[in-house]
């Protein structure tokens, strides 16, 4: 069940390199296992966070104060491109991230964020760059405020930027709605569709035992 | 074509641009399949349509003979997938059975993936199935559970892009080279937010397996969905496959599929045309598929780049890859060659690699693997003697699965070592921590194995 998201006033960390892919956000071997939830936070950005000997890379932004406590990421273009692994979002969530601001995101990563109560905000590159610059000038002290109800980001210096968001996604986050429950309320419609479609496209619909017979 | 297939699957309109869509086929694999089924169990929900759901292990199993060396967690995931699919009445194609293999190889091969069909899988390369004229895309774990519980998914209608590949492919140029060249041209985010339809004379002339390769890399363009209009080649490919319609139903299905291609006056949000005549074999040099050059090209020189952000990005990539700015890409020594993955592990891919490997030897110091995409591909290749040909040339012939494409099964390229791979991602650490990956076609990969370095396959053609 996703957590609700309404407002946030938090430390933001700029990670501005373009095309940060989901392999970089979380390595695959951290996701191979039967009970991985709750173990992923420290492995977010593992290949950037740690040196080859396993020690922390002091240059990586999330290893530095005050960014260590960041709840917002400010990101370069095409953040979260690549694999569909939802573990990328889980690892960010478990490391304390609640919102991500960028000029563009991988489509599947973007959808996965909403499923976990993380708010991805898409705004023009100039706004992203401006926010990153302000945060860097304040050496991380300047906080970024996000108001989902009002659809605004407030920069450390008080500049207010409005952002657009799919109204359905917004409502879902504000209330922490469970999509499966909502869709199951429409189960009669799903079954009616299937009954009609079975006549139109019978080759799509197998009988319960027919699929097994083929195998 | 997107609109036609989309509209056929709308159960309910959610908003102007968002619909509840029916899912025709749901494919599960060992990394996320059992997790989704257990998620449903914990909510006390049944699987809505187990007969439209199919599973196979591919990611976490070893590709060694007898599956030796499958990790403890890999075995746990396999056992869990067996138990949970069996409990839910879902068909699973298990190890050593015809039907097992990489999900995106077995879907088309078994006739599960059909033109006009809506297919999802918890894997971003699900776009592969679009090569048959299906609407197919990857989903995350939450959406996967949603599909198991409802056989439906809420989706926002994407924008449309048409990419026309016009002209004739030169000798040694493959579908992989075409799609890599496109990614180099419009960038790794060029397709974000779009469903891409591939068209043009080169696509019309291309066999279905090549179209699957083209569509497979849609996600590396940023596009969740890629598709090719179905035609006679598609119907010939699908006809007679295990789950494809037969008899009178076949005729009805083909009649319906003939109505799917975009109309002549269809309008797309973006159009791109690529001149195929000028494309030569491609190879990536960096850490994104957009870092690609022709095999006669050079590693870029950051000093030539004015934009400081781009310059830094290119410096990072060159540094990670251990290359020299401005150096020719051909001649770069390699340690590993991997021929496999959902991109390039079908019979035609293995034949193309074999044509280069035949009668030659893998260079000293290079480890070269051939990992067929499925049990069926493996058996067909063995029947043609390709396994012997590869083994005689010094390649290792392995068992079907994802293997070293993403190294989820522990099969890794060692830190600092360099690989030429027929897979789809050259991301940092993709083939193992600090591994360096160059993406290329199967023929180019075979040429690199023989030469011990990135080589121009056109010099090795017979």
Image (tube, coloured by chain):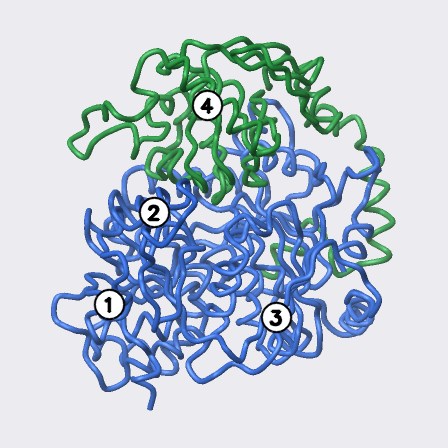
Chain colours: A green, B blue
Residue at the image position 39 percent from the left and 41 percent from the top: B308
- Which of pointers 1 and 2 lies earlier in the amino acid sequence? 1
Query: Label 3, on which residue?
Result: B241
Subunit bearing disc 1? B
Element class at badge 2: loop
Is residue B34 visible to us here?
Answer: no
**Res. A63 image quadrant:** top left
Element class at badge 3: loop
Q: Is residue B299 above or below residue B411?
A: below
Farthest bottom residue in view: B462
Badge 2 density bin: few <14, some 14–19, many ≥20, Cα 10 Å: many
Q: Which mark is residue B396?
A: 1
Q: Nearer the viewer, residue B96 or B64?
A: B64
Distance from the alpha carbon under mark 4 to that under mark 3: 58 Å
- Compared across the picture, whether B225 is left or right of B363 comes to right
Query: Label 2, on which residue?
Result: B430
- Compared across the picture, whether A59 is left or right of B99 comes to left
Distance from the alpha carbon under mark 1 to that under mark 2: 21 Å
Subunit bearing disc 2? B
Q: Which mark is residue A133?
A: 4
Placement of the C terminus of chain B among the 4 image quadrants: bottom left
């Amino acid at each position: 069940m996703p957590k609700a998201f309404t407002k946030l006033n938090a430390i933001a960390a700029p990670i501005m390199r373009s095309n940060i892919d989901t392999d970089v956000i979380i390595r695959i071997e951290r996701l191979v296992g039967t009970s991985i939830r709750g173990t992923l936070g420290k492995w977010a950005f593992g290949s950037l966070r740690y040196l080859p000997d396993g020690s922390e890379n002091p240059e990586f932004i999330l290893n530095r104060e005050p960014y260590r406590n960041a709840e917002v990421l400010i990101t370069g273009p095409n953040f979260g491109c690549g694999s569909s692994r939802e573990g990328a979002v889980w690892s960010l969530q478990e490391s304390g991230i609640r919102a991500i601001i960028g000029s563009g995101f991988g489509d599947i990563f973007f959808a996965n964020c909403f499923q976990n109560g993380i708010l991805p905000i898409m705004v023009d590159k100039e706004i992203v760059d401006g926010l990153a610059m302000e945060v860097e000038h304040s050496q991380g002290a300047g906080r970024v405020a996000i108001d989902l109800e009002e659809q605004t980001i407030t920069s450390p210096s008080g500049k207010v930027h409005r952002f657009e968001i799919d109204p359905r996604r917004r409502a879902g986050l504000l209330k922490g709605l469970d999509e499966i429950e909502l869709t199951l309320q429409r189960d009669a419609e799903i079954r009616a569709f299937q009954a009609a479609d079975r006549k139109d496209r019978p080759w799509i619909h197998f009988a319960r035992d027919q699929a097994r017979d083929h195998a | 074509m997107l609109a036609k297939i989309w509209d056929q699957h709308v159960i309910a309109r959610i908003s102007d641009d968002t619909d509840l869509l029916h899912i025709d086929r749901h494919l599960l694999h060992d990394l996320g399949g059992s997790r989704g089924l257990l998620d449903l169990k914990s909510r006390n929900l049944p699987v809505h349509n187990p007969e439209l759901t199919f599973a196979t292990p591919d990611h976490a199993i070893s590709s060694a003979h007898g599956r030796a060396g499958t990790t403890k967690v890999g075995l746990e995931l396999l056992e869990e997938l067996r138990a949970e699919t069996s409990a839910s009445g879902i068909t699973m194609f298990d190890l050593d059975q015809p039907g097992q293999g990489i999900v995106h190889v077995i879907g088309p091969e078994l006739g599960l993936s059909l033109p006009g069909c809506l297919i999802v899988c918890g894997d971003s390369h699900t776009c592969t199935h679009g090569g048959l004229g299906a609407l197919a895309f990857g989903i995350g774990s939450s959406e996967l559970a949603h599909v198991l519980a409802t056989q439906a998914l809420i989706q926002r209608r994407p924008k449309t892009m048409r990419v026309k590949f016009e002209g004739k492919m030169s000798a040694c140029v493959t579908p992989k080279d075409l799609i890599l060249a496109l990614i180099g041209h419009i960038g790794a985010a060029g397709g974000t937010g779009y469903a891409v339809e591939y068209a043009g004379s080169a696509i019309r002339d291309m066999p279905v397996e090549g179209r699957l390769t083209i569509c497979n890399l849609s996600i590396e363009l940023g596009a969740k969905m890629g598709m090719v209009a179905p035609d006679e080649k598609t119907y010939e490919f699908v006809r007679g496959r295990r789950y494809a319609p037969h008899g009178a139903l076949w005729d009805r299905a083909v009649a319906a599929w003939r109505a799917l291609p975009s109309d002549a006056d269809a309008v797309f949000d973006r159009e791109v045309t690529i001149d195929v005549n000028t494309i030569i074999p491609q190879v990536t040099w960096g850490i994104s598929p957009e870092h690609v050059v022709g095999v006669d090209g050079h590693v870029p020189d950051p000093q030539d780049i004015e934009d400081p952000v781009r310059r830094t990005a290119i410096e990072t990539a060159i540094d990670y890859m251990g290359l020299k700015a401005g150096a020719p890409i051909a001649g770069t020594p390699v340690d590993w060659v991997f021929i496999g993955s959902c991109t390039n592990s079908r019979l035609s891919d293995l034949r193309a690699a074999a044509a280069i490997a035949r009668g030659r030897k893998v260079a000293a110091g290079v480890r070269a693997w051939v990992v067929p995409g499925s049990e069926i591909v493996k058996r067909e290749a063995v029947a043609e003697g390709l396994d012997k040909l590869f083994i005689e040339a010094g390649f290792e012939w392995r068992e079907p699965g994802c293997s070293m494409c993403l190294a989820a099964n522990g099969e890794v390229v060692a830190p600092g070592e360099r690989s030429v791979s027929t897979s789809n991602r050259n991301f940092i650490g993709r083939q193992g921590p600090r591994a360096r990956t160059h993406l290329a076609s199967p023929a180019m990969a075979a040429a690199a194995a023989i030469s011990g370095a990135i080589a121009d396959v056109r010099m090795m053609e017979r």
